Image (spheres, rainbow, N blue to C red):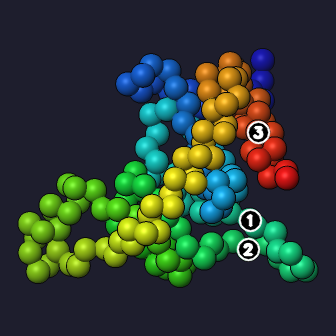
Amino acid sequence: MEPVSGEPDDHAIGRSRGGLTTKVHALSDGAGRLLVVLLTAGNVHDTTMFGQLLAAVRVARAGPGRPRTRPDYLVADKGYSSRANRGLLRARGIGHTIPEKADQAAHRRRRGSTGGRPPGFDRDRYARRNSVERGFCQLKHWRGLATRYDKHARNYAGAINLAALLTWLP
């Protein structure tokens, strides 16, 4: 039997601490509505998918013109804290608030004056990151998404896209 095009060999199922799992990587707008969704095996770390998530952003304009590919600002959790991700955002001119991990801060301080300055952090903006969590909670209201009954990743991604689409409707 031939593999289905677009379907990963592992069906986006990987072994992690909780057993066989799938990880949903997503970018959302300020209202918690999903803009980009990527599936990986559960053992894939968030920071490795950051570049692909950012590259997949396409937001249609109200009028004519090509879609926007650069958000005004990005707020992320500690899972996306890395020098490479911050450099990618800086290169694209995207402002960001990402808390620094404790081990990264300790390493920077241990290096002394050669460690550099700590990254900027806006507590007020970060407090609004709960909109992302609310977006994921809306997806988890769908029992099939919360438990992943689908064998194939393309079917599971389709169900996620349907649930995400319904959050955009008034």
On the image, the x and y values in percent for residue 9 come to: 63, 29
Tell which circle, 1 or 2, labels the residue nearer the N-terminal end: 1
Compared with 77, 66 (above or below) is below
Pick the residue in front: 50 or 71: 71
The amino acid sitting under disc 3 is: Ala
Q: Is residue 10 visible?
A: no
19 vs 48: above or below? above
Q: Earlier in the sequence, mark 2 or mark 3?
A: 2
Residue 98 is situated, as x and y percent measured from the top left of the image, at 40, 64
Query: Which label sits on residue 163?
Result: 3
Residue 67 picture quarter: bottom right
- Residue positioned 25% across, 74% down in the render: 118
The reply to whether callout 1 and callout 2 are in contact (CB within 8 Å) is yes
Amino acid type at mark 1: Arg
Q: CA distance from mark 1 to mark 3?
A: 18 Å
Q: Nearer the viewer, mark 1 or mark 3?
A: 3
Q: Which residue is mark 1?
A: 58
Q: Which residue is mark 2?
A: 68
Is residue 106 shown left or right of residue 166? left
Left or right of residue 124, residue 149 in this image: right
Residue drawn 68% across the image and 18% down it: 149
Image quarter of residue 23: top right
| Quadrant containing the N terminus in the rendered view | top right
